[in-house]
Image (cartoon, grey):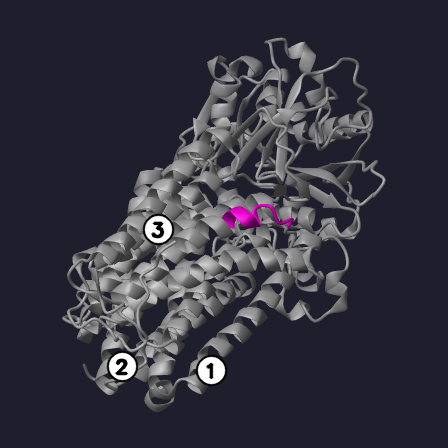
Amino acid sequence: MFLVLAASDVVDSVDGPKRSTYAGLFLTTLSLLQFELFLTRIYSVTMWYHFAFMAISLAMFGLAAGAILVEVMKKRDAHATLANTGLLFALSSAICFAVQLYIPADPENEIKWTALAFTLIAIPFVFGGMVVCVALTRFPARTGALYAVDLAGSAAGCVLTIPILDHIHAPTAVILNAGIAALAAAAFAWPLRIIDGCALSGLHSPRSSRMRWVAATCCVVLVAVAAVNQSTKRIDIQWLKGGRNWHDGVYEKWNALSRIYVRETGSEPFGWGMSPAYHPNRELQQLYLNIDSGAATVITNFDGNLNALEHLKYDVTALAHYLRRPTSVLVIGVGGGRDILTALVFGQRHVTGVEINPDILGVLTNRFRDYTGSLQTNPAVTLVHDEARSYIARSAEQYGIIQASLIDTWAATSAGAYVLTENGLYTKEAWLTFLNHLTPDGILTMSRWYYETQPAETLRLTALATASLMELGVADPRQHIIIVRKQDNSEVGQYSVATILVSKRPFTDADIDRITQVSNEMEFLPVLTPRFAERPEFEAVSTRGKYEQLMRSYPLNIEAPSDDSPFFFHMLRAADLLKASTFQGMNERNLKAVKVLGRLLAIVSGLSAVAIIAPLVVRRRVREARSFRLMIYFASIGLAFMMIEIGQLERLIVFLGHPIYGLTVVLFVLLIASSCGSLVSERMSRWIWLLPVLLAAFIFASPNVTRAFTAASTPVRIGVSALMLFPCGFFMGMAFPLGVKKALYAHKGAPTAWYWGINGAFSVISSVLAVVVALFWGVTVTLAVGLAAYVVGLAALGDLKL
């Protein structure tokens, strides 16, 4: 392979960036962001959800490390460096990704293999970071325009990710994305010429032409490999959560929300909460539907004979149907269709299934429509592609039963960072919406895991019910709550499934007697009824006078989540992390996730410190030009940008209904707005102090705005979100180019690459710290920390003039 090598004494191009340089930067940042988002989607399949955000941290660390390398290395011609590092980014992203697919990375057990996999993936981001740093710092007269192109490319990558993943196998998409990066390298190589063996910008030569042809050839080869792999799947995931991918399925489909995998399974009727009293008397044809290799259900073969599905009556998740029928039912999360079929078996008048993932609906209504009995054609069934909370809020109908069974169990999405915990279905505001859309005697029923040693998840579900009922003015919430669980017959004896029933009116004696009778027949165990409490904690959590005391005294945080802290599955308090008792009991995955967050925060802080200090040691001009105020400024805006971005992401995930919508809208709007702000940064520099004002307005006004538009359609909610985000994003985009200009004004030979590295290093720290702050103190505090960081940065810049 031929690369244009530049002599060490050749300095930056004096004639500025070419048009092809802008094109190359646009395509590079497009490819960088898509690579990052593709990895979060793939990691959510290959690793447990709390490791998916590692792709974001690896990307940001690689970008910061690339900037530091640019500073410590000897200067070379900017155009040649862009072409070389751009091509290295393209090739390394394809090669390193393909290699790490064969590494059995398991962050919980195989630390060495995992470290190797993460190291390989970091390499392309280092080269990508070098490209971006050179482009933004070697042409200081055009920093604003180049930064705008950088952000615009990232915005394009963000918005293209969804349609690409919806139509292309995810590992194939990574290879195709490398082809885009190679095309960027060809654009960077366009202005090169060779004089005495040195690469310069200007006229063309046979050798510079050869460089362009090498990059263009790599682009064509990578695109061809992607085209072949789309059908052959030769480059594919080899390891999933918990073991090898045996490729034994009958159907696989990737999209931006998940990876759906269907395979054949046994004939014994499936159910997480099946009664021990049920004894199969017939074989049943079923397909196993797996989502992100962590959430699973079955697709049941249905030929129209409901008598063949009697086993569905023996599942603890079906209890509400024994109390209210015939009535209208709304099912949140269609999955394989079990809850839809359950409603039909009980003879319910009509059932509406709301599913956010269009490909899951496609499995039932298209790919396996004959197998499922074409449920969508049944006059008693309506299947809807929408986000359930907003759909219910918009609905004028009232339902006799609203049901959600084990929704979002250990499945991640391309949002990455702690995505499972951002769940808008398990907040007090959501439950108020659900309860207000029930008939006068309607029931809200949800099923979650019940851990024998410490049933905190079920207690938190009960706290949600109690808090919501008290908000509606119910004097005695316990009269409105029934919880029943399946007996655990496993060898481990640790967990089972519990179902909660929450009624708008108090349960009658007949209701309680019926549940007691069914529980006895099914060998289920009552956990809480108006007459009985299995544990004193359940009596306390459902009683108005004892609720607050239990919230304070219970070893885990079981308080009802709110939209400001929508982390149902996160039950640790910051103050409890030093207590040994916290690490005993049920919440194993939550504990592991928090440990990983803590370790990662320590690691990225240490590595970032090294990245900042190293240039001070080895580069004389850094030591001579260092400015404490400029260091504070670039560190602050790096910290602030990620705090604000992740805070806005967390807030709008709940509003928009799913992490992928929140991620796409927030990133795209912020990047486009920041691009516009960067373009006018010099002309509007005096207005930069409007940024903290606009951020404060967003922090305090956005909750009221989102509440007002909760019932709006998804396009309207996206538009409202964009209008709220754009003003903040516009001024956020001005901060970096303004800092570069002021750094050059303060010192002619300012080490701008080093300042860019500081900015990147603190962005890495903030990408983890923001998640930590949101988990323990809420989204509003996360946004407030970002606001404070911007104020500190602007104050540090002070009266430095352009």
Query: Distance of mark 2 from mark 1, alpha carbons?
Result: 19 Å
Q: CA distance from mark 1 to mark 3?
A: 31 Å
- Residue 542: tell me if it is visible: no
Say what amino acid the circle numbered 3 marks: Ala
Picture quadrant of residue 304: top right
Q: 83 or 648, which lies in front?
A: 83
* Quadrant occupied by the C terminus: bottom left
Q: Is residue 503 above or below residue 602?
A: above
State yes or no: discs 2 and 3 in contact (Cβ < 8 Å): no
Asked whether, in this view, residue 95 is left or right of residue 49, the answer is: left
The tag on residue 743 is: 2
* Nearer-N-terminus badge (2/3): 3
Name the residue that disc number 1 marks.
613
Q: Disc 3 on helix, strand or loop?
A: helix
The residue positioned 32% from the left and 80% from the top of the image is 751
**Residue, far bottom:** 624
- Which residue lies at the image location 34% right of the left edge and 86% below the top edge? 621
Which residues, given as a range, are shown in magenta?
97-104
Query: Do the CB atoms of the residues marked 1 and 3 lie less than 8 Å apart?
Result: no
Say what secondary structure mark 2 lies in: helix
Read off the residue under disc 3: 181
